[in-house]
Image: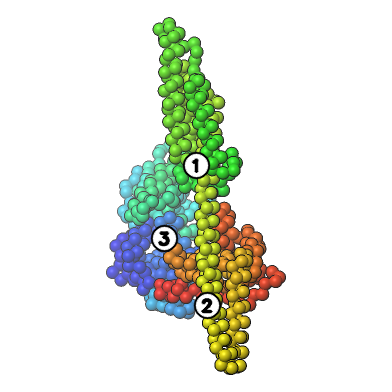
Amino acid sequence: MTAPHPDLHIGADVDPGETARIRQVLGLFVKGDERLLALVTTVKALPKLTHVAVTTRRLIGFCAPELARKGPRQELPLTAVAAIEARKSYQQRWFLVVQDASGEETDFGDLHDQDAPHVVQLVRDLTAAPPVPFTPAPPAPVAPVAPPVPVGPRGADSAAWRFNSPPAWPSPPNGWTPPPGWEPDPSWLPAPPGWQFWIPAPDAAPPALPVPPMAPPPAAPTYTSPPPPMSPSPPPSVRDERRPMFGGRKQRIEELELENAHLIQELARLGALGTVQLADENRRLRDEAAGLHRETQATRREYERLRDGIVETQDLALLQEAGVYEYQHPLADAVAYKAELAKVKDGIKAMARTGRAVVGATDWQVNGSAAQGRKMVTDFSKLMLRAYNAEADNLVRTMRPYKLQSAIERLDKSAQTIERLGKTMDIRVSGEYRSVRITELRLTADHLAKTEEEKERVRAEREVQREEEKARKEFEREKARLLKERSHVHSALARLEANGDAAGAAEMRAKLTDVDGALTDVEGRAANTRAGYVYVISNIGAFGERMVKIGMTRRLDPMDRVRELGDASVPFRFDVHALIFSDDAVGLEGRLHQTFAEQRVNQVNLRREFFYATPSEVRATLESIAGNHLLEYTETPEALEWRSSTTRRA
């Protein structure tokens, strides 16, 4: 594309930082002396358009991010425009519609209200103005053997020649020859340099004299009779759509320009070849493609072979594959695993002392001496055993339960390497010793998993004990308070009765009854360890709308437990949906957990009481459980802190 016209119109919504890049990429798709006159934004889904460009020859619609890779999405020559108008669309957008001579309408999307009038007027001015005159370049001197273009051969020689249309031109009808005064259509691409416009007819004998190459034709060519239909020129082919990893827009543009030049040269080379030469070139390219395919298959097979020999050791990949750990040797507790490991270690030491760990050749000789041969085999066997044991001990020391399979594979690879290196003297790790060391790895993984499981169980038991201790202390404080209050009421009742105040004495007796009832309740709850509150809480800011926690507490004030859960470990406080007192709160909690077992978030540690459920789903389950009166339930969480934070961020 030539330098921009001084009157170039840039749309109101066009990003100034992208303008230079868009114009540079658009320059790959313009033709000859075509010049950009306007660049505006548009909105269209099918096909997806983000910009509309008006040039001296065409109206072009394209998607800017994909322009270099896929080319323009929509094109219409100005010579085909019969009418253009902008129709009111929505807000500040105008719907650009172009109509051709047949009455068919083409939609170029919604333009900004500041751009639509300018584009419409510009296209109307261009379609009303006469075409720009074309001045062909002076033809190069040619020999008088073949008739020049555009005039076809005359006389007896006319049947022996056929007009050869360049690759980018439309194919003319059979037997067509350029009439006198014929010139190519200005919208066509120029013919490749040295193009032969006249070639021998297929059924005619070759001419006696060679056909000299013609000079390049004018930059643009119009069949006057009959005009064959012309399809819009396709965008340049892009064989490799991979982009640079870190940006590289300039690099991408340079690659496209180089590829465009290469394709033009290749097109010129192929266009100058004859039918037989084209067939040979086609066979050569097919053979080359088949060879590349065979090389690709061989490389892929080699890659798979090497990949099978690599042991996966990255923790992230192993964790993703591990899932729930399954014990290889189920035992009761960590102490039992430790005792079993001690037995295995004793067996390993015994095999190493008796020479059953590594075996080698027994008939090896050095300088004709069998004794020296046995000594060499023994020394090398010890060296190989030290290497194998070092690998095994390192795997035991760094073992994690999810690394078990990877560790076994690494140990097997070590044994295979030792066997390969000791092949000359037939030195290898015995199968029995390998089996014992693999058993050690499995027991070590089981021991670590069981130890962690017991630690988690101890942590959970301590948490329960702490909760029970807090509840017990609350009961004792409440009982002491009620006893003290009862003593005060007794003293007041005695004074009132002594003074003869019957009404006051009756009021004190009623209060004493209430205090006795409260004291009985506290003592009953302290004695009944299954009584307490079942709570349903959520934290929409931390866990989202589809997660709740269902738990139980024996505290006198259950909100104390809720406030503890919403401490600094979570960003927002928990919202309470229900607090249900029950004489069998443990059983009620268990039934709820069983109902939502499939929605449990942590399927491994069942002491984590979070579930993928909504408050309304929990309410429906509570209502279906007989014997529990649900007096109050809040489905919509208040979440004041989270909602205020969201509003401030917005």
Q: Nearer the viewer, residue 580 or 320?
A: 580
Residue lying farthest to the right in this orientation: 626
How many marks do you count on the picture?
3
Hey, what amino acid is under mark 3? Pro
Image height of 589 relative to 210, above or below: below
Q: Amino acid at mark 2?
A: Lys
Hey, which quadrant is residue 597 in on the image?
bottom right
Q: Which residue is mark 3?
A: 65
Give the residue number, with chain letter if any, for mark 2: 484
Residue extending furthest toward the top: 368
The residue lying toward the viewer, choosing from 152 and 419, is 419
> Quadrant where the C terminus lies?
bottom left
Q: Residue at x 47, y 47 (%)?
A: 316
Callout 1: SS: helix
Identify which residue is drawn at 46% across, 69% down.
572
- The amino acid at mark 1 is Lys
Task: Decide which of tag 3 and tag 1 comes sooner along the chain.
Answer: 3
Nearer the observer: mark 2 or 1; the answer is 2
Residue 558, by quadrant, is: bottom right
Mark 3 vs 2, N-terminal side? 3
> Residue 260: x, y in percent?
38, 50
Where's residue 109, x and y in %? 47, 71
Q: Is residue 629 visible?
A: yes
Pointer 1 residue: 403
